[in-house]
Structure formats: structure tokens, C-alpha cells
Image (tube, rainbow, N blue to C red):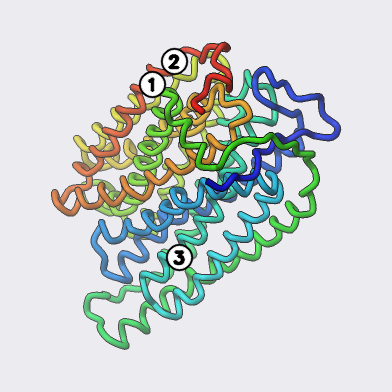
Amino acid sequence: MTTAPPPIVPVSSTDPAPDTSSGVHVDAPDLRIFVFALFFIFGGITSLNDVIIPKLKDLFTLTYFQALLVQSAFFAAYFLVSIPGAAIVRKYGYMRTAAIGLVTMTAGCILFIPASQSATFGVFLLALFVLASGITIVQVVANPLISLLGPARTAHSRLTFAQAFNSLGTTIFPFVGSILILGALSTVDVSTLSGQALDAYREQETRVVVTTYLGLAVALLLVAAVVWARRNRLKEQQEQTGGILRAFDLLGQRRFGFGALCIFLYVGAEVAIGSLIVNYLMQTDVLGLAEQAAGKHVPIYWGGALVGRFIGAGLLRIFPPGLVLVAAAVGAIALILISGGTTGLVAGYSLLAVGLMNSIMFPTIFSLASEGLGRRAAEGSGVICMAIVGGAIVPPLTGHLADVTGSLAIAFLLPAACYAAIALFGLFARRPLSPALGTSDLPG
């Protein structure tokens, strides 16, 4: 087996020495701002999928299952790129790797040009995969870095606060995207077109998507340039370890393995609901909205997560993180059941309110699962980011369930089952990991 480069431990040239007893950390407020910006960027771009899905579903006359292949192409990158991303961090450091991820995201945005010119659904999926590959690399950097930029005792709260900026992006981007992308939908019935007329219509309608993503490409290049200029901000020490595939032995630790599974389920549930919420709100027995109007409601879903993360950052300083996670998961299940059992405003807004329950789940699961990893934090982040592939699997399964049953309300019972497993993890991890379980006790 090829020996991978050693992991990187960030140490600021002006900050106190790391506290190796609880995992390395540095006190660098300016770097926290940088990481918050990364969370904002990749959160916002990811949430644009919720706007693109109804657009492509209309243009290519897709079933729910086919339309949700958008999420499969996007989140498959987490499964395929996370471990290589961790290897890049180990070789080049956090800041350089962040720049590499941002440039990869730029390439994905540019690929929307040939996707539009070909008017082919498969090429759009390729562009989304490349874009998501860059996001994966950036996220492998961001999650452990924000945990390291401060004392271990406040890691849960700090990561939740950082995720609030992720939610800020997911709140703003869909609203703007619904105006730019869904607002261009014409009244043409695509099912009546064929041949060259259909190809021409698709190319015309996808141009607005290209314009949107080219604007993002310019912004991403500017951010990458800023990050690259600060690539030497951290003095990064290296520690000799085995190959990068050694990261998988972390799954042998019950807490980490269960947590990784719950990241899979959480992302799958969150993405499934977000992907179908436009179509759900368009139903006559829910809100009966037009496509663009329904798209403008998507920020309510993600905005709930934004508000909840600021609130959660405070709650997690008072209550045990595991119990807060249980409460959030049970709340999500209750809201899904209320939505499915009612109609009108109650049905629509109770499902939108699931975003509030989602708010603390990812950062809390991540930090609970990662307790005790110490210098193996980058490896653990790579494995957990692989688990984000749940966003590629659960949404199409939810879409297939909707196709088979003819009911989105019934299909949402699958995300509810995911939340039930998350509640069990919260109970399992409700007690802090014993200080005796340091990195020396981890598998391998």
C-alpha cells in the first residue's frame, strides 16, 4: 500500500501552543471569518439544486426519480472525492487545499456552458458532479478547521455557529436563483415539442442557468485568489502515519461509525425534502402555488436552519449536545407527520418548518462522532464527508416512492425514518466521551 503524506496540524505563528491534550487548536479569529465564508459559499451553491431540479424536470419531462438524479450526481462526489480530499489536505495544508477546491468549483460552473449548448441532461449531471467535487474538497477543509480554531470544550457550539453561515447561503441563494432560473420558465408545454424544436427550446431555457453559474465562477475565482494569497497564514506541522485508507479503521469505533451513518441519513433526509418541496407546495391540496412562487418559499426551509443554528449555538452551551439532537430529530418527525396528515397552509408550512429542526443536526452529529479523534481529525472529516453521499441515495429513493404511491406526503415518511435513527444516535452519544479515550485508543 502506498504511504500517503502525513496529516497536517495547523499552528499559527502568533498564537499559543496547541493543546494536545484535547486535540490541537489555535486561536485565530481572522481564520474563523475565512472559514465562515467558505461555509456560506458551499452552502449556497448546494441549495441551488433545489431550484435547478424543477427547472430540469420541466425541460426534460422527467419523473421524480429521474429529476432527483441531480442530487445523486452532486452528492456522489462526496463519496468519491472525500478521501482524496483528505489526502490533499495532508499533503498541501488547509489553505492551499481550500484554493484547489474553489478552483475545482469554478471549473464545474464553467461546464454549464457545454451543458447548455448540448441541451443534454447527462452533461448537466457531469457539470454538477465537478462542481460538487470542489465543494467536497472545501468541506473536508472547513469542518475540522473550525473545530481546531478554538478550545475543544466549545467545538460543538463553534461548529454550529459556522453552520449558521452555511444556512445563510442556503437562504439567500435559492431566493435569487428562483428569480433568475425559475422566473425564465415559459408557458410552453414541453411534452408537445420534439426533435429540433425541443432541442432549441431546451438550449434557450438553459441559458439563464449558464449565466447564473458563470457569475458564480467569477466570484469563486476571486475568493480562490484571496485564499491563495494567504496560503502561508498557518505554519503546518506534519505527523507520520500510515496510508490514507487507514482512515476507514475509524469506523471500527462505535461512536464514530454510528455518527457517520447518521450523517448519511441526515443529509439524505434534508436534501430529499428540500428537493421536492417546490413540487409539494405546488400541489392544489397544499398551497397550490405557481413554480416561481413555490421556489421563493424554499428560503423559508433553509432560513429555519439559519435561525435554528444561531439559537442552537447557545443551547449547546447549556444542554448536552446528544439530548439537543434527540429533541431536534423528534421535532422533525412530528412536523412531517403533521404535514402529511393535513392540507393547505398547515401542510405546507409544517414541512417548511422541518428546516428549523435540521439546524443543529449536521454540526452536532459531526462533533459528537469526532470526539477523541485528535490529530486524526482530517481523516475523520474525510470519512464523514464520504457519508454525505446519503444526499445521492435517499432523495432518488424518496422520489421513487412518490412515483410508486403517487403521494409526496407518503414519500416523506422515508426521511422521517432517517430522523428516527438520528434520535437514537443522540441517545447513544448523550454522555461526553471519556477523556481516557484518546487517539491512542482509536482503531489502528
- Residues 358 and 121: in front is 121
- Residue 141, numbered label: none
Tag 3 secondary structure: loop
| Residue at the image position 33 percent from the left and 71 percent from the top | 59
Counting residues from the start of the chain, the first of labels 2 and 3 encountered is 3
| Residue at the image position 57 percent from the left and 66 percent from the top | 107
Counting the numbered discs, the total is: 3
Name the residue carrying label 3: 181
Report whether residue 40 is seen. Answer: no
Report whether residue 193 is seen. Answer: yes
Name the residue carrying label 1: 326
Please state the horizontal and vertical placement of residue 287, each as a whole percent of the image.
Answer: 28, 48
Please state the horizontal and vertical placement of residue 173, each as a whole percent of the image.
Answer: 52, 53
Name the residue carrying label 2: 430
Residue 374, picture quadrant:
top right
Bin the neighbour count of mark 2 within 10 Å (Cα to Cα): few under 14, some 14-19, many 20 and up.
some
Please state the horizontal and vertical placement of residue 420, each as a whole percent of the image.
Answer: 30, 27
Bin the neighbour count of mark 3 within 10 Å (Cα to Cα): few under 14, some 14-19, many 20 and up.
many
Counting residues from the start of the chain, the first of labels 2 and 1 encountered is 1
| Residue at the image position 84 percent from the left and 35 percent from the top | 13
Q: CA distance from mark 2 to mark 1?
A: 9 Å
What amino acid is labelled 3 in the image? Ile
Q: CA distance from mark 3 to mark 1?
A: 37 Å
What amino acid is labelled 1 in the image? Val
Q: Would you say 421 lies left or right of 3 here? A: left
Please state the horizontal and vertical placement of residue 314, each as a whole percent of the image.
Answer: 57, 21
